[in-house]
Structures are given as C-alpha cells and as structure tokens.
Amino acid sequence: MELWDAYNSNFETIEGLTLVRGQEDKIPSGVYHLVCHVLVRHKDGTYLLMQRDPRKPYPNMWEASAGGSALKGESPLQGALRELREETGIEAESLELLDQSFLGNCIHCRFLCQTDCDKKSVRLQEGETVNFHWASAEEILSLSEEELISWPMRKHIK
C-alpha cells in the first residue's frame, strides 16, 4: 500500500491526514497529493524521452520526464530524486525546480536534471517504461498530443 502526505492549497502538509494510492476519488476537496516530474537534459543538449508501458494509462506514449507521486514523508526534491533513480537509473545529486502547479487533486512539482551520464546506461523500470530515446528539443517539440504526454514540460525544453 502506497501512502502519501496530504497538502492544503498553501502547499503545507495537513497533519493527521494520510492519503492512499488507488483511493484518489476519496480525497476531499481542497486536499492535494504531491506529484514530482523530472526533465532530464544531457550536457550535449538532448533530452531523455521515456516510452510508457502499454499496460499503463496513455499506453506507448512518450514522456519528457520521469516521475510519480511522492511517498509519505518525502519532500518534493526527495520524491523527484527517487522517481528519477527508479525509472531511469540516473543518480543525481541536485535538481533545479522549474515550476509548481495545481491540477485536479495534485500539486505538480517539475524539476530539471542536468546530466553527463552515459546515455546508454538508462535503465527501464518494469511495468513503467518499455523504451527510451535521447531527442533534440526540435524533435520533442514536433511531437503531437497523441505521441507526447508531457505537455507541461514543453515550455522548459529549449
């Protein structure tokens, strides 16, 4: 069972309230959980695209981020670093916060990881991703809504 912290609209943890993955329909109005996203840019200027597992929502679509829900007790940065490591194998020491926004019952925190990792060392996470590709900004920005799920990240791709 995956547990999440509950947040109010001021991005403050609500003490005494724990949210449970799979019970999003039970999250009260005005209560949010934290979702972390990491855009990965290689030192050569390319960006990491991850292809979603066909069994997940938005099957086979490309994402310009690694990410997911922060676990109970994790800060946005801790959640982002964990998700990056789990979904790509990339170990980052720091990330740059790009933006935060509310959508539905989620607070989305978007980060940038600048890396010089071996581009062939990306590791796919079973059940999450099935392929990866390093792409230029132009290539990513040319993808359609049917191909790319990470539309909020587009404004950070240069």
Image (cartoon, rainbow, N blue to C red):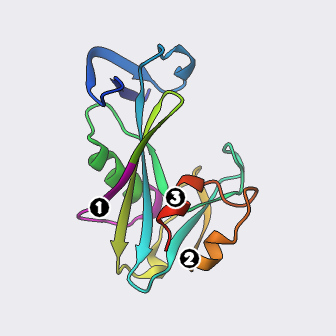
Q: Quadrant of residue 30?
A: top left
Q: Decide whether residue 91 is among the magenta residues.
A: yes
Quadrant position of the N terminus in the picture: top left
Q: Residues within 10 Å of mark 1 (few under 14, many from 20)?
A: some
- Residue at the image point whose x is 30% and y is 61% from the top: 96
Give residue 95's mark.
Answer: 1
Question: Which kind of residue does numbered mark 2 sit on?
Answer: Ala
Q: Which residues are magenta?
A: 87-99
Residue at the disc numbered 3: 153
Q: Which mark is residue 30?
A: none
Residue drawn at x 40%, y 57% as measured from the top left: 84
Could you tell me if the residues under marks 2 and 3 are in contact, i.e. CB atoms within 8 Å? no
Q: Which residue is farthest bottom? A: 44
Whichever of callouts 2 and 1 sits on the residue coming sooner in the sequence is 1
x%, y% of residue 151? 60, 55
Q: Position of residue 52 (x, y in %)?
A: 64, 55
Q: Quadrant of residue 90?
A: bottom left
Q: Which residue is mark 2?
A: 137
